[in-house]
Image: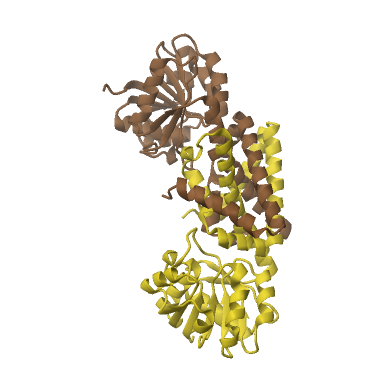
Chain colours: A yellow, B brown
Amino acid sequence: MKKTFFKKVAIVGVGLIGGSLALDMKRLGPAGHVVGIGRSRENLRIAESRKIVDSWTTDPARGAEGCSLVVVAVPVKSVARVVDSIMPVLDKGTIVTDVGSVKEKIIEEVEPLLKDGVSFVPAHPIAGTEHSGAGAALTGLFKDKKCIITPTPATNQEALNTIRELWQEVGSQVVIMDAKLHDIILAGVSHLPHVIAYSLVNTIASMEEKKGQTLLEFSAGGFRDFTRIASSSPEMWADICSMNRTAILDAIEEFQRTLEELKESIARDELSAIKRAFERAKKIRDAHIADG
Amino acid sequence: MKKTFFKKVAIVGVGLIGGSLALDMKRLGPAGHVVGIGRSRENLRIAESRKIVDSWTTDPARGAEGCSLVVVAVPVKSVARVVDSIMPVLDKGTIVTDVGSVKEKIIEEVEPLLKDGVSFVPAHPIAGTEHSGAGAALTGLFKDKKCIITPTPATNQEALNTIRELWQEVGSQVVIMDAKLHDIILAGVSHLPHVIAYSLVNTIASMEEKKGQTLLEFSAGGFRDFTRIASSSPEMWADICSMNRTAILDAIEEFQRTLEELKESIARDELSAIKRAFERAKKIRDAHIADG
């Protein structure tokens, strides 16, 4: 099989995801020269010193010129703005792809901006940590992880195949899915947990204020693990909440109903109902999630 | 300083906490002979083969006879029942202590059961994992962890000092605190997170049922960490919800208000309010919790 190869690739947003993809594309073959594009010179200098990028610029249009692949790895609310700013310089045959955690709204914003001969392939690698920036980029981040690609009727089939091969070459298992379904699934398993983790830490902070008493110093390992995702980038996650609003609100409401039901069982001291709810959760989690 | 030493110690409930304490008491000096007491012969045999206990019995009264220290490490709703069953055989001067995550209600139930000359010291080591049983016991589990002791006006001062020394000898930092305050703090940093984690997993399960679509296979590391505590013992946690009902209901309601406020910001697409809430949480978490 001929391997995917891009002579010159632009990565817009050399953070955890963009930076990790650049590292693996250079390490595993799919990329020749990688241009890093971003707003922070400091972050781009880190990317250069870590050999994540071969060159860099803060000017998206200059950086994207002559690239056959542009990976837009910026917060989801900025994807369309970036695509708009680089479109004039892109050659025919160029593929633009993204890595955003929201797909329907990005597609809605980006597809009208495409000029003839330029393809957009919406993608989302399910990988990450709570850290951000080029300093957090890791080789092998996508190995054995899922990458969801959400083509639309407008998606060029050849470009879709190329992006699928790219993610397979960095070790991911590619799943093709409808954008709307992607957004509902991710609202449940990723966006809702972030909303809850942030809210839990803020709840503890409010309790501390009301009681005039430190609580966090009495937290243990469970709390540390539980709230790790509350250390994620606020800008990135505020954007996701805005761009996947409907699905996230549905997920929050489903969670509110579940929690309210459990609260009522606790209020009525219905020990067997409480235990049954906990047993159901433990059984599902133990069956589906292997602890690393 | 004369080291604390108990010639014969009974551990009722040789699980994660009871078993780990037994291991460290034998390893570090405070215990001569350790008798394991429990309901499951299989668990007690594991405890014996791992040299956590020197002997074992399923009969609490027989096991506690002749012991100068009895550590009751059973689910919080069973502490008083255990204390009641062993009381007749205890010698004058014997200390009974517990390790429960709820203090006020245990004290209320246990103190009336004490006979003359037997002391009860309510204690709670802030340590643990989501695993349970003698197989999960670890040496050094309490090292550099906090142990909260919540004496009452009825607590014997000498017994309190002895239990304080015991926890210090296994490496814990002892904090003396009012039982009511303990219960409020733990409701926030431990009980509420468990209630939420169980509810989140059940929410995902409900979403899966409604959509007829698997969601959990698209979860990543964040979700795994976030829901780890949902693999904790349902029996133990149902008991805690019952025994610390008032403080847990208060904590759930504080959380519900915080989440509802965030939900409303998301519904109105107030990006800066959402970001502000996330920034507050990230700042607090990053400042107070070091990732291991």
Q: Which residue is at the front of the view, B91 or A249?
A: A249
Judge left or right: residue B9 versus residue A100: left
Percent position of residue B283, x then y: 50, 51
Q: Splitting the image into 4 quarters, where does residue A234 fall?
A: bottom right
Can residue B214 be seen at all in this image of the molecule? Answer: no
Residue B176 position (above or below residue A117): above
Residue A9 position (above or below residue B268): below
The quarter in which the N terminus of chain B is drawn is top left
Q: In the image, what residue occupies the spot 63% across and 43% down?
A: B255
Judge left or right: residue A1 versus residue B193: left
Can residue B69 be seen at all in this image of the molecule? Answer: yes
Q: Which residue is at the front of the view, B171 or B94?
A: B171
Q: In the image, what residue occupies the spot 43% across and 48% down?
A: B290
Q: Splitting the image into 4 quarters, where does residue B121 fall?
A: top left
Residue B82 position (above or below residue A188): above
Percent position of residue B157, x then y: 41, 16
Percent position of residue A135, x then y: 42, 65
